[in-house]
Amino acid sequence: ELTTSNHMSWVDDFPFAFIGSTIFFGIIVIYFIFYSSNVLGFIFTKILGFFIPKYSYLKFGSLNISILGGRILFKDVVFATENMCLRAIDGSIKIIWWREQVRETLDRKANKPCRMKIQMSGVEVMLFNNTGKYDQLNEIILNGDAIGNVIEKLIPVSAYQKSPFEKLFPAISFLLKQGCIYIGSPY
């Protein structure tokens, strides 16, 4: 049975409950609009940090994944090793997974779309060492191998076979809006 005293206490509490829930949901909306991609980028940075080599650095500033749309958006990506550094201001990877007929070759005259489209802007690639190749060349020179053996060691035969990734994405569309490549040490 509803009495007037119970009814009045609920009405008196209504503005405070409404204001509290509005503030709570406002904070949730602000988080999803402004901070969720930054938090997802931080989480991916930490997870992928376990799988990269010891002397490497990887950072995602922000990351947004849309599974149904097949799109990955990223900003402020940095990957550095002892031999190179790659930095991208922003970019997107779009995978057209729903298409059955896609371009199978690199021929641009084909009217079929590529299954994967990569767009990047503000890309910097700095190559300042190649210690792995230097070590291989030093070993080859010390062993006195013939030139045929040198080519086989530098370019392995497995590089000529198609990987499962190449079979799934035979042609990839790549659009680079702005970028630069530095080769060598500036000092």
Image (cartoon, rainbow, N blue to C red):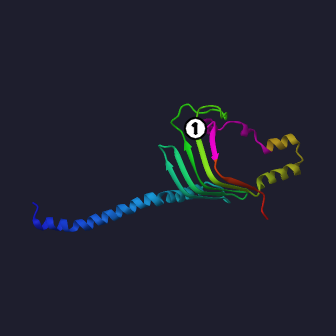
Q: Is residue 138 above or below residue 155?
A: below
Q: Quarter-wise, where is residue 23 in the image?
A: bottom left
Give the answer, above or below, for where 140 lies relative to 85: above
Q: Is residue 13 magenta?
A: no
Q: Is residue 170 magenta?
A: yes
Residue 153: quadrant of the picture:
top right
Q: Measuring 58% from the left and 51% from the top, which residue is drawn there?
A: 91
Q: Which residues are magenta?
A: 154-175
Instruction: Give neighbour class at mark 1: few <14, some 14-19, many 20+ (Cα, 10 Å).
Output: many
Residue 145, placed above or below residue 179:
above
The residue depicted at 32 percent of the width and 63 percent of the height is 22
Residue 49 rendering spot, x and y as whole percentages:
59, 57
Q: Is residue 94 left or right of residue 34?
A: right
Quadrant placement of the N terminus: bottom left
Q: To which quarter of the image does residue 111 belong?
A: top right
Across and down, in percent, residue 155 comes to 77, 43
How many numbered marks are there?
A: 1
Q: Tell which of 10 and 109 is nearer to you.
A: 109
The residue lying toward the viewer, choosing from 41 and 52, is 41
- Quadrant containing the C terminus is bottom right
Query: In this figure, which residue is indicated by the disc labeled 1?
Result: 115
Looking at the image, is 107 positioned above or below residue 136? above
Q: Amino acid at mark 1?
A: Arg
- What element does badge 1 sit on? loop
Q: Position of residue 182 (x, y in %)?
A: 74, 56
Give percent across and percent down for residue 164: 62, 38
- Residue for point 54% across, 48% down: 72
